[in-house]
Structures are given as C-alpha cells and as structure tokens.
Amino acid sequence: MALVSGQTLAMQGGPKAVKSDGTDKYPPFLKDDVMRRIGALLDAGIITIADGGGIITEFETAYKALAGTRFALTMNSGTATLHSAYFAVGVGPGTEVIVPSYTWHASVTPVLHCAGTPVFADIDPATLTIDPMDIERKISDRTRAICVVHTWGNVADMDRIMAIARARGIAVIEDASHAHGAMYKGRPVGSIGDIGCFSLQGVKAVSGGEAGVATTNDPNLFDRMVLLGHFGRGPKAEGNRTFDTLGDMSLGAKYRPHAFAVALATSQLGRLQDLNQKRSRNYAILNDRLRNGDGIEIVEPREGCTRGGYLEFKFKVARDVLNRVSLDRIEAALNAEGAPFQKDRYSSMNFTYGLLHQAPLFTSFDRRSLGGCFYDTKSYNGPLESASLPVTEDVCTRLLSTYAFVDVEDAYLHQLADAFEKVLANISAL
Ligand SMILES: Cc1ncc(COP(=O)(O)O)c(C=O)c1O
C-alpha cells in the first residue's frame, strides 16, 4: 500500500475518500421463497412441530449434508445448542470447560447452567481463534470439555486441539455460530469435534430469525440433547434407545424451534454457498489491499481451510500506530471519510467482544448467591478463572470491524482501503 501523505482528511474539511454507495444489495432473505414455505405450513394448519418431522426433517437433512454428520438437531437458539452440548458431554458440578474469552458470551454462559466452571484460554493473534498451547496450560484433571469458536468464520487449529483432547478423553464442542459452511482441511466445521453448535439468529449466514442447530456423529450425544430439551421428539437417535424407559419425556428445557423459523432457515440454507462465495471474494479484495499496509495486520484465514459465514470483517491496527494515535481517533477519522469501521464493540450495546474473563460475572460476582445450578461454580478448591490473557487483551484494543459485505461494488471496497491509506498517512494530523 503506497501511503500518500498531504491529503486533507475529511474530518478537517477535505474530500471524503469513500464516494461510492456502500448499500449492500444482497437481500437479507428471499421474501417470496420464505412466504411460499411459511404459506405451505399455514395452508396445512401447521404452526408447531413436536416430533421433528416436516420442515424440521427437511432442514436437518440439508444441514447434515452441509456439516457431514449423522445427526442434526434444530433448536430455538444457538445458546440452546451450547447448553445442550455441554449437558450432553457431561459438564456438571466440579468440572471445567476451557473456553476462549474472545467470543460472544453465549459460548461460555451455558457452562454455568450445567454447574460447570469456565476456564478462559488465550487466542492466537493471527486467526483470533483459541490457542492450543494455552489450552494445554489450562487443562486440569477436572477438564471435561474444550469449546472451540471458529471466530468470524476462521477455523480453529482443529488437528492440534483434537489431539490434545483425544489424548486425555476430553470432549470438544465446536461453536461454529460464525462459520456456517467453513471447511477445515476438507472437513466441514461441526463434524470435527464431538458436537457442532450453530446459531441461526438474525444476523447469521443461515438464519431463522432466532434458532440454532447442533450437529454430531454420536447417537448417545444426540439422545442426551434430545432428552434435555425436546419433549415429543422420540424415538430418539436412529437405532439407539439410550433413554427408552423414559418414553417421550424430556428434562423440560424447551428447545424446540418455531416451525416458521425453520422454514426461513431452510430458505437461507439454500443460498449459503452463494453468500459465502461473494463474501470470500470481497474479503480477498479488502485483505489484498490492506495486507501490505504498514500499520495494519490482517486476520488471515488458516492455511488449508475455507472460511465461511464470516459475520463481520475484522483487522488489527498495529501497536506502533496506536502508540501515536488512539483507536477512537482513527475510527472517527475513518467514519468522517465515509468508511463505516468501528471498534470491536457489539453494535448498539457497546459491549466489547472478548474480555469475558474480565467481566464481573466471571470475576467479582459470587454466582453462588444466585442458587440453583450456580451453587457449585466456585465451591471447590480448584483454580478460578484465569486472571490474565495477554494476547486477547492486546488484540481487543487494536481491532477494527466492518460489515461482511456481500453485494457491494468493488469500487466501494477499494475506497474503504483508500480511506485507510489516507488516515494512516496522516496520523500526525489526527
Ligand atoms: C460465537 C457465538 N456463539 C453463540 C451465540 C449464541 O447464539 P444465539 O444468539 O442464537 O443464542 C452467538 C450469537 O451471536 C455467537 O456469536
């Protein structure tokens, strides 16, 4: 990237670097197709499905094909899939689950609902996914599971993580909520660990508005997830009668999805490949422009992997730039240029991704005071949550974020990169 100094920044009255219209023309859903699917349900008088048939079977059949697993279980949220997964692999009182701090809180909080204790691990700065070396450091004889998040569609280091887990009999849960359709060395995410968890919430690459789907090859794990939250879904996993004596009973967490949500998700699943191809192309354009720039560090895809889902576009501003000017100031200058980049906060909630290990819920707050399943979390003499995660803490102060563009003009993407060149070349004026 050739840094051209001497241009007047837009925040100081100069012309904006971004001149093209950045409106994403990709429709959030295919209205006619969704209406047809929901209309068919209404015509048949179907507004709820308890036994996993009809549109739920259709969706799960397609999702199993995508994830390459024997089973898929649709639920009403991604959070529900994570709770079900932790329950299924036996997270309980006195057990620990190694989790990244750089993730949405729902990768972690369901551990508490199983009366387990989250133990935070650091991330690899290049990919923003959990660091296998830190996983090894955090393992104890209480570790029951590792939660791997394929952050922003970038696949975690699954070979190393699976080797660590298998050598010790620890389960691996893949939180693939950002990564629908991503591949790890030819294998779909959601099929590599013991259970894959996918949010199908409104902004996700496959969305039912609110929904989720869990994938597994293990009939016993599937049965345990059914038992937790799917009254009426029996007989349970094909050919497997783990909980035969319980009949259709469930443990009462009602994780059944709404039939209309599944109809929407089925429609969306049909265009996932197209969405991922378009996002990949746009990422490549932006990354190729930004990659060589002094002052910017790209989040590179893991070698041998295909990114999918994406959710948001991220990159890091170099530390030496931030020693000279604050990220707030860079953000303001970029926004003035017409480039919609923002610090890695969670949209309007102003919630910063990735510092969960510093959140009061995991540090100062005595969760035992809540009672219920929270009684156990700090009641043994094992290690409490890790106090410091240097990479996560560093990276979180350096990330900038923008949309995972699907259908915008190439010129617009180039102008976003131009805005960066301009702002970075004029730091002294900020
Ligand atoms: C990484 C990750 N895990 C879990 C979830 C929870 O999914 P849901 O909102 O569908 O419950 C999300 C949602 O944004 C997420 O990003």
Image (cartoon, helix red, strand yellow):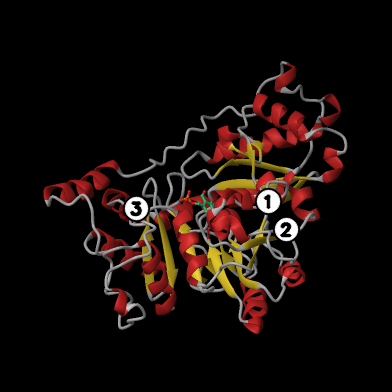
The residue closer to the viewer here, 395 or 222, is 222
Q: In which quarter of the image is residue 425?
A: top right
Q: Quadrant of residue 318?
A: top right
Element type at mark 3: helix
Q: Which amino acid does label 1 sit on?
A: Phe
Marks 1 and 3 sit apart, C-alpha to C-alpha, by 34 Å
Residue at image mark 1: 362
Instruction: Locate the N terminus by quadrant.
Output: top right
Q: Is residue 327 above or below residue 234?
A: above
Element type at mark 2: loop
Q: In which quarter of the image is residue 146?
A: bottom right
Question: If you read the primary sequence from the N terminus, does the residue marked by circle 2 or circle 3 appear first?
Answer: 3
Residue 50 seen in the figure = yes
Residue 267 at what x, y percent from top left? 31, 52
Total numbered badges shown on the rendered structure: 3
Residue at image mark 2: 385
Q: Which dot marks residue 265?
A: 3
The residue closer to the viewer here, 403 or 412, is 403
Residue drawn 42% across the image and 52% down it: 77
Q: In this view, does 366 lie above or below 64?
A: above
Question: If you read the primary sequence from the N terminus, does the residue marked by circle 1 or circle 3 appear first?
Answer: 3
Nearer to us of marks 1 and 3 is 1
